[in-house]
Amino acid sequence: MTALEKAKLAAKALDDKKASDIEIIDVKERTSLSEYFVVASCQSTVQVRACIDEVEEQLENEGVNVLHKEGYSTGSWTLMDYGDVVVHVMQQEMREFYGLEKLWEETENG
């Protein structure tokens, strides 16, 4: 499975659990951390966890296992590292505060 296919499957899983503002950000030319970031917003801790569980299940069904997961217990921002894809699921307030998309736009533009 390619990195883009993993990112799209993660985005689908997030959509299945009603996450909002789902974005796939191509970062392969800007960092060695991964090829894609998938970023999504949720309304509650329960929804963040449900989304993370769904991403993990759908990717495991395709033989792709998470390498590292952080923030699941707090549920405000959870990160899942799949090597070439990093999934960020966060409550809306956290996403607005940290502005990951803006950070990567600034990196891209200068």
Image (cartoon, rainbow, N blue to C red):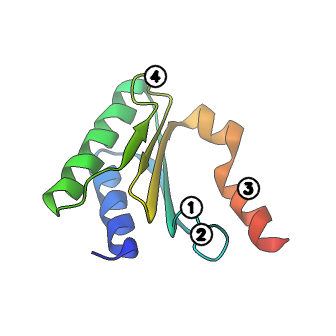
Residue that label 2 marks: 27
User: In this picture, is 32 found above or below 103?
Assistant: below
Residue that label 1 marks: 33
Indicate the amino acid at tag 1: Leu
Indicate the amino acid at tag 2: Val
Indicate the amino acid at tag 3: Leu
**Residue ID at (29%, 50%):** 55
Q: Are marks 1 and 2 in contact (CB under 8 Å)?
A: yes
* Closer to us: 69 or 103: 69
Tell which tag, 4 or 1, sits nearer the viewer. 1
Provide the secondary structure element on which disc 3 rests: helix
Q: CA distance from mark 4 to mark 2?
A: 26 Å
Mark positioned earlier in the residue sequence (3 or 4): 4
Provide the secondary structure element on which disc 1 rests: loop
Mark positioned earlier in the residue sequence (1 or 3): 1
Provide the secondary structure element on which disc 2 rests: loop
**Residue ID at (56%, 37%):** 92
Label 1 neighbour load within 10 Å: few <14, some 14-19, many 20+: some
Residue that label 3 marks: 103
Residue that label 4 marks: 74
Report which quarter residue 25 is drawn in: bottom right
Q: CA distance from mark 1 to mark 3?
A: 15 Å
